[in-house]
Amino acid sequence: MTTSASLFRRVWQPLKTLLSRLSGVRMVWGFVRSDGVYLPHTRVSNHSQIVSRERLDIGDHVYIGHFSVLDASGGLHLGEGCQIAALSGIYTHSSHVAIRLYGRAYALTGHKQAYFEAPVRIGAYSFLGSHCVVLPGAVIGRGSLVAAHSVVKGQFADFAFLAGNPAQVVGDTREIDEPWLVQHPELREHHDAWVAATSAAQALTP
C-alpha cells in the first residue's frame, strides 16, 4: 500500500541516500516519488543515478541495482515490482545527431533540432539483467525477462523473454514459470495475484 509521504520523509529519504554513501555501496529502502507518494518497498542503490526524477513514474516493490542510470527526461514508467540489475542504462533521449549538427554551439542552444525524446515503459514484475541498455521509445510488457547485455529497442508484448543486440523474443516467461508453479503450488496464489492486479490496472490506463 502506498501513502503520501510526510514532510519528514520527503527530507529524510534523499538525505539517507547521501549519508549511506559513507558506508559504501548499498541498497536504500523506501522511495519518495515526485508526486509525494511514499513507496516503502522500493529499493534504489545509493550509487545509481536518476535523471529528471520528476518525470519518473514508478511503482512500489521496484529494485534498481548498483551503478545503473535511469534517464527519465523523456518520460519513464517502471511498473510495480520491476527489477533493474546493476550497471544497466535506461534512456529516453538521444543527442547523437544534434551534437554533430551544433558542435560548440550545442551547450549554448536551448531547443535543438535532431534532439530525440521518447518515453520508455517497462511493465510490472519485469526483470532486466546486468549491463542492459533500453533505448528511447522502448516498451517492455509486464512479466518480461531481458537477458544480460541486451540492447532493447521497439515494443514487446507481456511475458516476453528478450535477448541480444538488438534484443529479440527468444521465449515466453510463462513457460519458464509454469514448472516452478507446478512444483510449488503454494506460489500460484502470489503469481496470479500480481497478474490479475496488473491486468486490471492496464484496463484502466487510457
Image: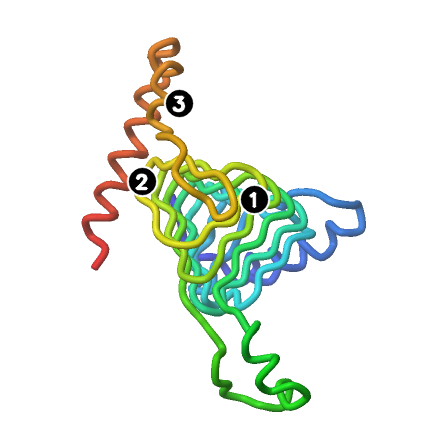
Q: From the viewer's perspective, is residue 134 above or below residue 36?
A: above
- Residue labelled with disc 2: 158
Give x and y (percent) for residue 68: 62, 51
Could you tell me how far apart the alpha carbons at marks 1 and 3 are, in whole angstroms? 26 Å
Mark whose residue sits in front, 2 or 1: 2
Looking at marks 1 and 3 on the same chain, the residue that comes earlier in the sequence is marked by 1
Q: Which corner quadrant holds the C terminus? A: bottom left
Could you tell me how far apart the alpha carbons at marks 2 and 3 are, in whole angstroms? 14 Å
Looking at marks 2 and 3 on the same chain, the residue that comes earlier in the sequence is marked by 2
Residues at marks 2 and 1 touching, judged by CB atoms closer than 8 Å? no
Horizontal placement of 189 versus 94: left or right?
Answer: left
Q: Which mark is residue 43?
A: 1
Task: Inspect the image, locate mark 2, and give the three-letter code of the amino acid beneath it.
Answer: Asp
Task: Inspect the image, locate mark 1, and give the three-letter code of the amino acid beneath it.
Answer: Arg
Give x and y (percent) for residue 113: 48, 85
- Disc 1 crowd rating (10 Å Cα; few below 14, some 14-19, many 20+) is many
Task: Inspect the image, locate mark 3, and give the three-letter code of the amino acid beneath it.
Answer: Ile
Give x and y (percent) for residue 92: 48, 64
Which residue is found at the position 42% from the left and 65% from the top? 75
- Residue labelled with disc 3: 176
Q: Could you tell me which secondary element the residue under label 3 belongs to?
A: helix
- Disc 3 crowd rating (10 Å Cα; few below 14, some 14-19, many 20+) is few
